[in-house]
Image (cartoon, helix red, strand yellow):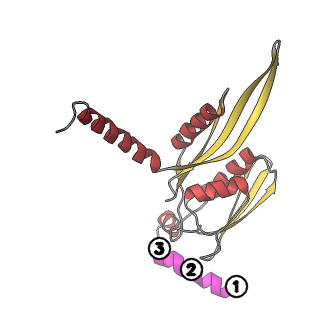
Amino acid sequence: MAREGQGRDDKRGRGGRDREERDNEFIDKLVHINRVAKVVKGGRRFGFAALVVVGDQKGRVGFGHGKAREVPEAIRKATEEAKKSLVRIPLKDGRTLHHETRGHHGAGKVVVRPAPAGTGIIAGGPMRAVFEALGVGDVVSKSLGTSNPYNMVRATFDALQNQQSPRMVANRRGRSVAEILAKREGSAEATA
């Protein structure tokens, strides 16, 4: 015999699980927490700013910045903002980038380039979080200029948004993907 309240709990449990599955679609990485102090008459008031990167590890990634008086609230705000700002990045074989690109934001400059299978993610802290959330398995990157995590993340997004797959290039030029790939391989052989 089922208990009276059991059916209600099951419904709530299932609804909670559905919401959890939607949230589990994304992974979030906390990149940086900044503590700031405001000096007032009674002493100092502390506030926190969080930088979070969110991705589905299948080519979608976003970042967000949240501020609050408590750390968990700042992280929650940053995560919500990151989910609203997701962008799709084309990946080659689902594990690396298509070509080398450079990105910059302010004094932050980054270079990202594809890598052969088994290389792993060779990147510094904030950039590593972006690549892990994006689902890139093999990439070589270098940060030039600032080490400010906000500018590094924005520069990395600038570089990633400059990525173009052969399909995108073929559509733009009005050619087939095979023609684009043949030219790419032909130019690689000529330079070697």
The structure residue drawn at horizontal position 40% and vertical position 47%, both measured from the top left corner, is 21
Q: Amino acid under label 1?
A: Thr
- Residues 182 and 113: in front is 113
Query: Could you tell me how far apart the alpha carbons at marks 3 and 2 are, in whole angstroms?
Result: 10 Å
| Residue 177 badge | 3
Inter-mark Cα distance, 1 to 2: 12 Å
The residue under label 3 is which amino acid type? Val
Sequence-first disc among 3 and 1: 3
Residue bounds of the magenta highlight: 176-192
* Nearer the observer, 145 or 164: 145
Secondary structure beneath disc 3? helix
Element at badge 2?
Answer: helix
Q: Residue furthest left?
A: 1
The residue type indicated by label 2 comes to Lys
- Graded by Cα atoms within 10 Å as few (under 14), some (14 to 19) or many (20 or more), the crowding at tag 1 reads few
Reading the image, the residue beneath label 1 is 191
- Image position of 49 with respect to 163: above or below: above
Q: Which mark is residue 183?
A: 2
Quadrant of the snapshot with the N terminus: top left
